[in-house]
Structures are given as structure tokens and as C-alpha cells.
Amino acid sequence: MSSTKTQAVRASATLSLPTAALGVTFGVLAAPILGALAAIVMSAVVWSGGAQFGALTVLTGGGGVGLAAGTGLLANARFVPMGIGFAPSVSGSPVRRALAAILVVDASFALAHRGEGRFDPEVVVWSAPLQYLGWVLGTIAGALGASTLASPTSLGLDVLFPVFYLGLLVPELRAAGRPLAVAVAAAVVALALVPITPEGVPVLAAAATALLGLKGQP
Amino acid sequence: MTWVLILALAAGTIALKVVGPLLAGGAAPPPALTRVIALLTPALLTGLVITSTFASSHDLVIDARVAGVGLGLALLLLRTPLLVALVAAAATAAAIRMLI
């Protein structure tokens, strides 16, 4: 157990660096829109880059709070299949499984994967604190430094967001089934809808291409 | 309204994380639903990547972001660590903006 713990803490320390960098980016971009305090509180209680960047993208584009919340939560819809996949690896009551699942973030989910859909819950639990600290401290630095730092775009920080998502997407594309075909369809749908629909709709429509999975395996 | 949004995102995220473990436990959903759920992640991530790379409000534009994200994608396909890909992508976009 203690070696699992040490390994988890060490591995999550490496992954907390990009997490903190993304936190800074979120803080810098969110502070002018939400206010510094709200940006920091959001990171502390939501603890999800996907949801927070999704919601912020909608607000920045002039969308309303409802659309922002919907987009943010749809960005986190992946936690449903992740939770279903993770749960059988946690022993004990459903409540214990649920508590462990709350600590799952993308980085710890990837670190805890032991192949064949099995997960090591110890890794999730022990890598959570550094992931959380990296995200919240990064947001604080970004939000409070937003006015003094150079503009995020001049530092290229705005591309961290799509590249972070690509970091999650690329392993997905290597999985069995037809994620690549769905990703191509999603890309076409999103590109086609950007000029003609309200902010947030292209992403929702892109996500709906997952329904291609209803057709059965090729 | 900002605080409503924060509460909704926090409560909603926790609900999404616990719904599987609480309801499904160890049981598997029907195969068609499993396939849709598995494809939801790549479909959604693609939508987010595309809009954050090419969209500027309601216009599709090709700017420094495309170069940075393109390099990031190439590095990730070569199994470069995420941190390296992030730094290279940001540096590329920043350099292009400085030169133009």
C-alpha cells in the first residue's frame, strides 16, 4: 500500500504542473469576466477544467448563464461513463464507491488505469490532493495576477486549452470501436455550426454525434 | 448570476461523478448505451478542440492558434508528454504573434 501511495504522489506531482499551468490560464481568462474571487471559488468547488473552460467560453462569447452551465456540465458528461467504469474497482458500499468517484479527475483516472478496465482506487485517492492544490493555487495566481501579467494571448496561453483537450482525446482515438469516425463527424458538425448558431450549440451538436454508436459495431 | 453558475457546476459535476457508482455499481448498461457513452468523450472533446482552435465569436479564422494546436497534436500523436506538448504549443502561438 505505501509503495502505491508513494508512486501515486510522485506521478501526480508531475501531472500537477500542467494542471497548475491550466489553472493560471483559467484564472487569467476568468478574472475579467467573473471577477477574481468568483474565479477562485469556482476552481475550489467545481474542480474541473473541462466544465469551467466550457462555461467560460460561453460567457466570453456573450451566452447566458443557463447555456454556460449546460455546456460546462455537458463537458463533464464523460464522468458518467468514467464513474461506471471506475465503480467496480472500489470495494465496499455504494456510498464508499461514490466518495471515491468524487476524487476522480482526468489525470488521476489515467494514472489509476491498470488496463482491461480495472482501476486502482488508492492511486485516485492519493493523487487527488496535489491535483487539487495545483488547480486551485494556479487559479489564484492567475486571477490575482491577471491585471499585472502580460495578456494571456501574447503568451500563447489560449492554446493550452485545446491542447489539453487533445491530450485527453488522442488516447481516446486509439481505443477500439470507431472513435476516429465519430471525431471526424463531430469536427465537421462543429465547423459547420460555428457561423450560424448561438455560442455553445456547436459543441453540444458535436457531442450528439456519439449517437452514431446506436448503429451497432461495423 | 455568477454564483448560481458556480453552484450549478459544482453540484452538477458531483452528481455526474456519483451517478454511475450509486446506480450502476458493478452492473453493465445495455451494449448500445455503452457504445454511445464510450463515444461521447471523443465527440465532445473534438467539439471543444475545434471551437477553441478555429472559432472567433461566430467567425471561423485561421490564426496563430492553429499553428500552436497543430504542433501540440503532432507531438501528442508521437506520444510526447502532455506538459511538453502544452509548452511547445503555447510558445509557438506566442512566437507567431510576436512576429506578425
Image (spheres, helix red, strand yellow):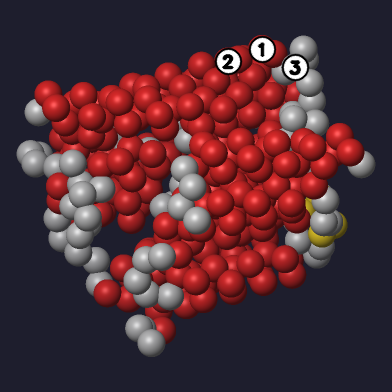
Amino acid at dot 3? Leu
Quote the CA–CA distance across marks 3 and 2.
13 Å
What is the chain identity of the residue bearing mark 1? A
**Residue found 79% across the figure and 25% down from its top:** A151
Residue indicated by mark 2: A140
Out of A12 and B24, give the one closest to the viewer. Answer: A12
Q: Kindly report the distance in space between the C-alpha atoms of the residues bearing marks 3 and 1.
A: 9 Å
Residue A81 percent across, percent down from the top left: 33, 56
Evaluate whether residue B47 shows in this view: yes
> Which-is-in-front pick, marks 3 and 2?
3
Q: Which residue is mark 3?
A: A149
> Are circles 2 and 1 on residues that touch, CB within 8 Å?
yes
Q: Amino acid at mark 2?
A: Ile
- Which residue sits at x=42%, y=39%? B13
Amino acid identity at mark 1: Leu
Q: Chain of mark 2?
A: A
Instruction: Report which residue position mark 1 lands on.
Output: A144
